[in-house]
Amino acid sequence: MKRIVFLLGVLAILAASAPPAHAAVFTLTDLNSVFQIDSAFGADLWTVDGVSQLYEQGFWFRIGDDSAEQRLGNFYSNGWVDPGGRTATLQFVHNSFTADIVYTLTGGTIGSRTSDVAETIRIINTGGGSLPMRFFQYCDFDLNGTPGDDKLWFPNANTVRQVDLGSGAMVSETVVTPVATRYEGDIFANTRSRLEDDLPTTLSNLPAPGGFLTGDVTWAFQWDRTLPRNGTFIISKDKHLDVVPEPGTLLLLGLGLVGAEVTRRRRKKA
């Protein structure tokens, strides 16, 4: 329901910038986990022990600071899944750079409710001069299949954590290297709408250290790098899903909810 409503809301944008005709879907499987990537729109499925955990993860970029962001998937060129079924490589070609993204899924035993996806992104400047790259990752986890009851915070500059406060008690932790230039947590679909509009986006660095968001949360990282001619920029990311490890963690999260509540500026997902 949420996906249908949101897609109707951006139908005009999609019509104006249709994805490549050769867009493809890649599915990774390992033990208790399934991870799916749409070459045009990014990852849109991560099930662990049969329960959906992810609504969307996508990549956007901007060259310089005077134009709007573009979705990386609009420049998809080629992709494949390795014979083992756990690793996919997607390649993107722009007239100023190439980008390769390698995803590797590691599942847990059946019933363990744990899973991991490692990602490596390589951007190579293929233009004739320097490349002022602004690269964005946006992620919308709906932990335990329930979008409206999550808590999100940034423990440090390269880590984001999200916890499902309902009965599922799932926790996601994402670590990025190198440290991003900026970050942002927000309520669906504020950040995504800014990445899709006609203006350049600068992430807000909110919530500040010690702060958090609750509700239908999303997060994003932004890397600003100027690549010399033939230069390379590599980003490594690891996304880990698990059950909350101990009752004390849930207690601390519950106390945090009493202390603050972020006003929801958009409707809850259906």
Image: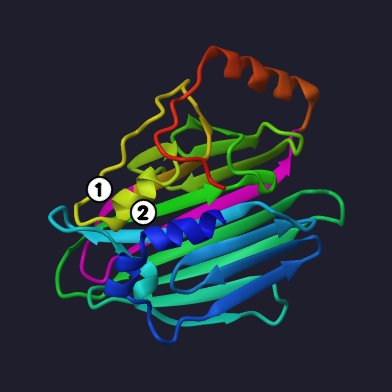
Dot 2: within a 10 Å radius of its alpha carbon, few (fewer than 14), some, or many (20 or more) residues? Answer: many
Residue in the picture at 38% in, 51% down: 192
Residue depicted at x 52% and y 38%: 160
Disc assigned to residue 32? none
The residue at 51%/40% (across/down) is 268
Q: Is residue 186 above or below residue 80?
A: above
Corner quadrant of residue 62: bottom left
Mark 2 residue element: strand
Residue 241 point in image, percent of width and height:
68, 47
- Position above or below: 236 against 161: below
The residue at 20%/75% (across/down) is 127
Q: What amino acid does circle 2 point to?
A: Phe
According to the image, label 2 marks what residue? 136
Q: Earlier in the sequence, mark 2 or mark 1?
A: 2
Please say whether residue 168 is one of the residues in the magenta stretch. Answer: no
Residue 42 appears at what percent x and percent y? 48, 65
Whether the residues at callouts 2 and 1 have beta carbons within 8 Å, the answer is: yes
Q: Is most of the magenta stretch helix, strand or loop? A: strand
Residue kind at label 1, given as amino acid type: Thr
Can residue 17 be seen from the camera position used here? Answer: no
- Residue at image mark 1: 201
- The magenta span reads 223-244
Q: Measured from the top left, where is residue 217 in percent x and y?
A: 50, 39
Disc 1 crowd, CA 10 A, few/some/many (<14, 14-19, 20+): many
Q: How many marks?
A: 2
